[in-house]
Amino acid sequence: MEFEDALKNLHKSKEFKDWKKTHKNSFLTYAFIMISEEVKKEWQIGYYNKGKDTISTFTVSEKIHKNPDSEILKGEGIKELDPEKVKISYEKALEIAKKLQQKEYPPHTAEKKMIILQKLAIGQVWNITYITKTFKTLNIKIDSLTGEILKHDLLELFSFNK
């Protein structure tokens, strides 16, 4: 299921409509999906609750489930997503990421893939992280509107100090 479909299904659901009645000032802040053989594909869609400084997350698959609210991680700040600026599907973003991985990082194939749609200082992106078979993380940020690769880097998953 693509992000757009997951968001439409969420907005039509009783769970979301009931929640929205008491969270009128909340806004869409992220969407997450993990691709792995061990994990069922389901969207986690999060809304920032301004007054409470919390995130409400909904799991969207065959059914809609509201997860308990969680405190936010302080970082770059919470930014609102614009669904109208998602012209590149997550599957297209994965194709772009795979081409980059094969060209720039051939020995580092993905064991698991984490995909987050979020707005960062560099723009609204598909933030794709590969957990690789070489115990590294390959992170690729792709503009959700244009499909342009904005940033990519390979990092050690584990580092051991002597």
Image (cartoon, rainbow, N blue to C red):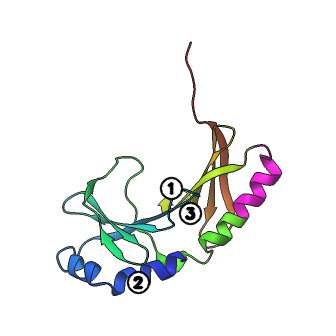
**Highlighted magenta segment, given as a residue range:** 96-107
Q: Quadrant of the N terminus?
A: bottom right
In the visual, does 9 lie left or right of 54? right
Q: Which residue is mark 1?
A: 121
Q: CA distance from mark 2 to mark 1?
A: 29 Å
* Marks 1 and 3 close (CB-CB < 8 Å): no
Q: Residues within 10 Å of mark 2 (few under 14, many from 20)?
A: some
* Residue 7 against residue 47 in the figure, above or below: below
Identify the amino acid type marked 1: Ala
In this view, the mark in front (2 or 1): 2
Q: Residue at x 37, y 58 (%)?
A: 78
Q: Quadrant of the C terminus?
A: top right
In this view, the mark in front (3 or 2): 2
Q: Earlier in the sequence, mark 2 or mark 1?
A: 2
Q: Secondary structure at mark 1?
A: loop
Please tell me the numbered disc located at residue 74.
none
In the visual, does 130 lie left or right of 65? right
Q: Secondary structure at mark 3?
A: strand
Q: Which residue is mark 2?
A: 9
Identify the amino acid type marked 3: Val
Outermost residue on the front side: it is 38
Where residue 52 sits, quadrant-wise, is: bottom left
Q: Which residue is mark 3?
A: 125
Identify the amino acid type marked 2: Asn
* Residue 82 against residue 68 in the figure, above or below: below
Within the magenta stretch, is there residue 122? Answer: no
| Percent x, y of residue 10 | 37, 80
Q: Secondary structure at mark 2?
A: helix
In the visual, does 8 lie left or right of 160? left
Front in this rendered view, residue 138 or 150:
138
